[in-house]
Image (cartoon, helix red, strand yellow):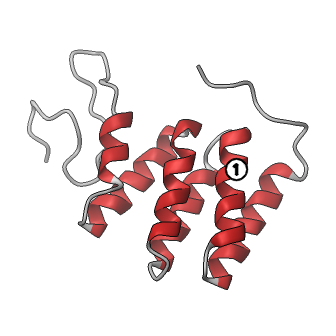
Amino acid sequence: MTPQAAAFCPACGTEIAFGGRPADTMPWLLSHLKRSDRDVRISAIRALGQRADPSASSALARLALSAPRDIWQAVDAIRALHQMPICRETDDALMQIRDAHPSAAVRAMARHVHEEMFTFSRGYADPVL
């Protein structure tokens, strides 16, 4: 159970509406990608995927590449990218992981998601403002 005054869920980092208006959680979630606690990072990755805001794409790609031995963290980052709109930011992030991750399995997953999202698309979505 979350305390009534909490702005974010302590378990997953999901934003909790306050006074009918949600707070801007993007900087908070992005900062949690740098935390040493792996569970906090995974929760932030999943919350960013649910937000589907492509401005987090490059941070997710950097995180996937920063811990090459943590395959599941990279998989969660790719899943989060898969939830985002088709745009230049997600395209670039998936290509970075596809081309640079040391794990063949992670590269294959990034390639599959990239092909699924971009091969049959008719172009990028309008930029998110």
- Amino acid on which disc 1 is placed: Asp
Residue at left offset 66%, top offset 42%: 89
Report the quarter where the C terminus lies.
top right
Across and down, in percent, residue 19 comes to 21, 15
Q: Which percent across, then down, holds residue 96? A: 67, 60
Question: Along the horizontal axis of the image, is 56 left or right of 21?
Answer: right
Q: Is residue 19 visible?
A: yes
Q: Position of residue 70 (x, y in %)?
A: 44, 78
Vertical comparison of 65 with 24: above or below: below
In percent of width and height, residue 90 lies at 66, 46
Snapshot quadrant of residue 113: bottom right
Helix, strand or loop under label 1: helix
Query: Front-most of 15 and 110?
Result: 110
**Residue placed under numbered mark 1 in the picture:** 92
Dot 1 crowding, Cα within 10 Å, few <14, some 14–19, many 20+: some
Determine the image quadrant of residue 116.
bottom right
Q: Residue at x 82, y 60 (%)?
A: 115
